[in-house]
Image (spheres, rainbow, N blue to C red):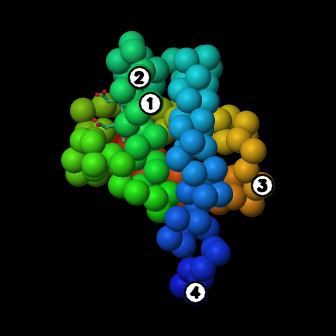
Amino acid sequence: MAERQPGDYGYEDTSLKAMGGEPGVRTLVDLFYDEMERLPEARTIREMHPSDLSISRDKLAAFLTGWLGGPKRYRERWGPIRIPPAHAHLKIGASERDAWLLCMQRAVDQMPVADDFRAYFMREIAVPANRAMTRP
Ligand code: HEM
């Protein structure tokens, strides 16, 4: 595959900008957790989280800011993180992964972002979602 060029999604902070910068990421994460609270398919993964989702919202927004090529906000506040060990204590199989991705799809569908970026984002986020699985 050719290297990413300036302007491509994935190049430096192009993806963060396409999401609407840090305020856009925060909106996405709020929509994501709103979906998790609402969707029956997400009940199991909602119950894995603390009842108060404030810190979960802060942590996911901070992580995604860096993951989208922006400043490493998660590391600044909480130190280094890797997705597999961060989820090792949870039971995450294919159905939990799919529920998580469904919440994210519903969230990004409500974001005023370019259609090609939305599709790119969902393809890319599936990679760490698979790595978060702890069950075959
Ligand atoms: C595949 C389905 C996933 C499920 C079911 C899931 C579930 C969870 C749960 C329940 C927590 C809270 C753990 C606790 O409070 O003990 C958590 C933490 C977290 N998750 Fe996920 N997650 C998934 C995928 C992802 C992905 C794909 C990302 C990033 C792209 C992510 C990023 C995070 C982060 C940054 C934290 C905070 C870790 C910490 O500071 O302890 N998760 N996840």
Residue 103 visible in the current orientation: no
Instruction: Mark 2 and ligand 1: say if the CB distance to the nearest ligand atom is below 8 Å.
Output: no
In the displayed structure image, the side of residue 81 where residue 130 appears, left or right: right
Asked if the residue under mark 2 is in contact with the one under mark 1, i.e. CB atoms within 8 Å, the reply is yes
Q: Which residue is mark 4?
A: 2
- Rendered-image quarter of ligand 1: top left
Q: Position of residue 124 (x, y in %)?
A: 55, 58
Residue 62 visible in the current orientation: yes
Spatial CA span between label 4 and label 2: 40 Å
Instruction: Mark 4 and ligand 1: say if the CB distance to the nearest ligand atom is below 8 Å.
Output: no
Q: Which mark is residue 54?
A: 2
Q: Quadrant of residue 52?
A: top left
Amino acid type shown at disc 2: Ser
Q: Quadrant of the N terminus?
A: bottom right
Q: Position of residue 13 (x, y in %)?
A: 52, 65
Q: Which residue is mark 3?
A: 115
Amino acid type shown at disc 1: Arg
Secondary structure, mark 2, is helix
In the displayed structure image, the side of residue 57 where residue 21 appears, left or right: right
Between discs 3 and 2, the one toward the N terminus: 2
Q: Which residue is mark 1?
A: 57
Secondary structure, mark 4, is loop
In the displayed structure, would residue 108 be above or below residue 11?
A: above
